[in-house]
């Protein structure tokens, strides 16, 4: 399942970018989460990532672990491809593409 992660860094860990990133990548890998893309942003969130997680529990475990490390906070949102959205619309009688 794909997820979009919206992240805010803690002030302390924003100064230790490479260490935080290395640790987070290793933890994600150990949970079976594949990081597909990483984008740093300006505004409300410091980064937006797209990941592929084997299940919701793995994604939840990563989010909890990330916060426990003091790295900051992550908001994870399931991301659906167009085919899944069209299928869902058809189930409720709406028209997709």
Image (tube, rainbow, N blue to C red):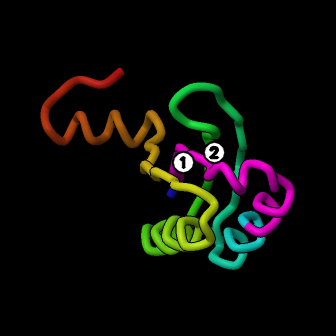
Contact between marks 2 and 1 (CB within 8 A): the answer is yes
Tell me if residue 28 comes above or below residue 83 in the rendering.
below
Residue 43, image quadrant: top right
The residue stretch that appears in magenta? 2-23
Q: For the point 56% across and 64% down, which residue is it? A: 53
- Outermost residue on the right side: it is 18
Q: CA gap, disc 2 to disc 1? A: 5 Å
Estimate the x, y position of residue 56 in percent, counting from the top left: 43, 67
Decide if residue 87 is on the left or right side of residue 2.
Answer: left
| Element type at mark 2 | strand
Earlier residue among tags 2 and 1: 1
Secondary-structure class at tag 1:
strand
Query: Relative to 66, does residue 44 appear above or below in the rendering?
Result: above
Residue that label 1 marks: 5
Relative horizontal placement of residue 21, taking residue 27 as reference (left or right):
right
Any mark on residue 38, and which? Answer: none
């Amino acid at each position: 399942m794909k997820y979009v992660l919206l992240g805010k860094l803690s002030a302390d860990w924003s100064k230790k970018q490479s260490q935080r990133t290395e640790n987070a990548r290793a933890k994600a890998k150990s949970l079976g989460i594949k990081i597909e893309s990483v984008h740093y942003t300006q505004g409300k969130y410091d980064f937006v990532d797209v990941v592929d997680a084997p299940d919701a529990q793995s994604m939840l475990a990563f989010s909890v672990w990330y916060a426990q490390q003091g790295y900051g906070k992550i908001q994870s949102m399931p991301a659906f491809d167009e085919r899944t959205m069209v299928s869902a619309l058809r189930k409720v009688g709406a028209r997709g593409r």
